[in-house]
Amino acid sequence: MNATNWPYGRDRTQRERPRKPHDRRLLVVLMMMLIAIGSLLLLSAPTASAETRDRVDLTNACKNQYHRQTVYARHVDQKIAGVGYKQTPFGYYCAEWSDQANVSESPSYEFDEREVGDLDVQAYCSKYHAGSHAVGNYDTDRTWDCVSP
C-alpha cells in the first residue's frame, strides 16, 4: 500500500478516526446536563437582598420595656375597665393585674386590670435586632415583625 492509497488521508500520521453518530449526541447531552446543573446552582444560591423577619413576642416586649414580669400586651380593641378604646402608635399597650384587698363588712379580694403604658415595638426591635425596623402585619394577624435588610 502506498501513502496515497491509505483510506484516511495521505499517510498514517494524519489519520482520523471516523466519528460515530452517537458520539455527537453524547456530547450534546453532557453539555445540556452541565448547563442544567449550573442553572440550578445559581437559582438555589441565597440572594443578597433577602430580608430577615423576626416575630415580636409582644408580651415579652412589654416585660422588657417596663422591667416587670407581671405585664402583658393588650390590643387597643380589647377594652379594659376605665381605659376604653384608645389610640397607640403600635396598636398595643401594656397592662397588668393589680390586686386590692377590700376590708369592709364583707371582706373580699379583688383583681383589677390597669394600663401600664403604650408598647414601643420599634424600641424592642432596635434593642434586640440591631438595624431592623418594626413592621406590622395588620391585615393578617395583628402581629409585629422586626425586619432587617
Image: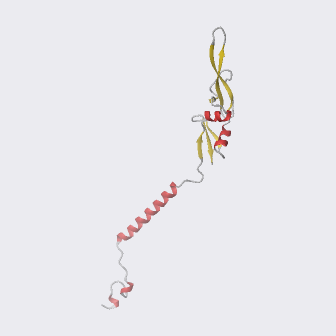
Foreground residue, 137 or 25?
A: 137
- Specify how the rendered protein is coloured: secondary structure
Quadrant for residue 72, please give it.
top right
Q: Nearer the viewer, residue 12 or 101?
A: 101
Residue 116, percent across and down? 68, 28
What residue occupies the far bottom of the structure in this picture?
2
Q: Tell me if residue 26 comes above or below residue 149 in the rendering.
A: below
Would residue 30 be visible to someone looking at this image? yes
Across and down, in percent, residue 101 comes to 65, 16
- Asked if residue 36 lies left or right of residue 97, the reply is left
> Camera-side residue: 72 or 21?
72
Q: Quadrant of residue 27?
A: bottom left
Number of marks drawn: 0
What residue sits 67% from the left and 26% below the top? Answer: 115
x 51%, y 54%: residue: 44
Farthest-out residue, left = 1
Residue 58 image-quadrant placement: top right
Image x and y of residue 134, in percent? 65, 41
**Image location of residue 105, percent across then percent down:** 65, 8
**Image quadrant where one finds the N terminus:** bottom left
Extreme-top residue of the structure = 105
Q: Is residue 130 left or right of residue 5?
A: right
Question: In the rendered image of this protein, does residue 85 appear above or below residue 53?
Answer: above
Q: Is residue 85 visible?
A: no
**Residue located at (62% from left, 42% from top):** 146
**Left or right: where does residue 11 sit relative to residue 113?**
left
